[in-house]
Image (spheres, rainbow, N blue to C red):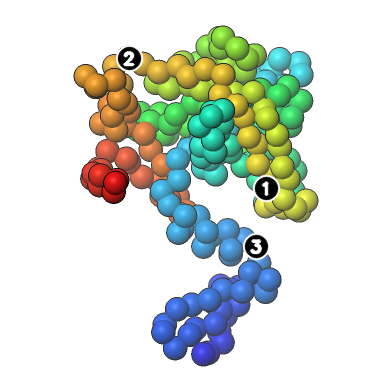
């Protein structure tokens, strides 16, 4: 084995050619870059919330997944600012109100959703900044995103926190109260198709990915 360091990483190269990166000896920013380059593609949750004064907030998160089917639950993980260590408005609002909405991000919405990730002063409307339209939800105060073909209303089940410095994350788990989707997304069998949904995801760095190129593999048994 050989020891070396590249771009701040503490690395060990094995005889098999595998590079091992020691997370304890490597800046968290470098570990983050490696993780988002290999944990791909990541779906994007466009999360809307409101604060205690009723002001709306909108932000995209690519640390996002389904965690339970019965009861149906989603989770997303907002990180503290890598520069200041401050908590994201989305997390503060979800904790305060116990509610959020997840909208699906499509090819058509990608540029506007990207603009919603800008650091804006608390209380500034990302909906207005990104050119998106809030619409009334049925079960929660957080608004739907009118331009998205899928919106999912959620109530917070729990919030777990990991670390307290810049880049530290929190896991926000929400139970699904309602799913709103356009009828035109469904095929004749009642299934949402990738071709109709045209969702996008995140890769490493500034790269995004389309999801229309698919292949089928029947499950065994």
Q: Residues within 10 Å of mark 2 (few under 14, many from 20)?
A: few
Give the labeled residue for mark 1.
169
Instruction: Using the rendered image of the protein, determine whether residue 145 is visible from the camera's viewpoint.
Output: no
Instruction: Using the rendered image of the protein, determine whether residue 175 is visible from the camera's viewpoint.
Output: yes
* Foreground of the two, 114 or 38: 38
Q: Which mark is residue 68?
A: none
Q: Residues within 10 Å of mark 3 (few under 14, many from 20)?
A: some
Q: Is residue 23 above or below residue 49?
A: below
150 to the left or right of 176: left
* Foreground of the two, 112 or 68: 68
Give the labeled residue for mark 3.
28
From the top left corner, tell me how far across and down residue 124 is, in percent: 66, 24
Q: Earlier in the sequence, mark 1 or mark 2?
A: 1
From the top left corner, tell me how far across and down residue 66 is, in percent: 51, 37
Residue displayed at 73% across by 45% down: 161
Q: Is residue 205 above or below residue 118?
A: below
Q: Earlier in the sequence, mark 3 or mark 1?
A: 3
From the top left corner, tell me how far across and down residue 71 is, in percent: 56, 28
Q: Is residue 58 above or below residue 171?
A: above
Q: CA distance from mark 3 to mark 1?
A: 12 Å
Tag 3 secondary structure: helix
Residue displayed at 70% across by 34% down: 158
List the single residue furthest toward the front: 221
């Amino acid at each position: 084995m050989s020891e070396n360091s590249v771009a701040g990483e503490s690395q060990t190269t094995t005889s098999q050619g595998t590079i091992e990166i020691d997370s304890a000896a490597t800046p968290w920013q470098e570990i983050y870059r490696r993780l988002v380059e290999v944990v791909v593609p990541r779906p994007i949750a466009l999360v809307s919330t409101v604060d205690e004064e009723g002001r709306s907030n909108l932000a995209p998160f690519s640390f996002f997944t389904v965690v339970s089917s019965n009861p149906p639950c989603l989770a997303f993980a907002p990180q503290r600012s890598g520069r200041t260590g401050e908590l994201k408005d989305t997390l503060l609002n979800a904790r305060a109100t116990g509610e959020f909405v997840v909208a699906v991000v499509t090819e058509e919405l990608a540029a506007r959703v990207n603009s919603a990730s800008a650091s804006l002063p608390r209380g500034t409307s990302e909906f207005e900044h990104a050119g998106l339209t809030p619409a009334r939800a049925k079960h929660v105060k957080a608004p739907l995103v009118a331009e998205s073909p899928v919106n999912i209303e959620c109530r917070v089940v729990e919030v777990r926190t990991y670390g307290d410095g810049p880049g530290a994350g929190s896991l926000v788990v929400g139970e699904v109260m309602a799913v709103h989707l356009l009828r035109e997304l469904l095929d004749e069998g009642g299934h949402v198709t990738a071709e109709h949904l045209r969702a996008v995801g995140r890769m490493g760095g500034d790269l995004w990915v389309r999801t229309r190129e698919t292949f089928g593999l029947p499950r065994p048994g």
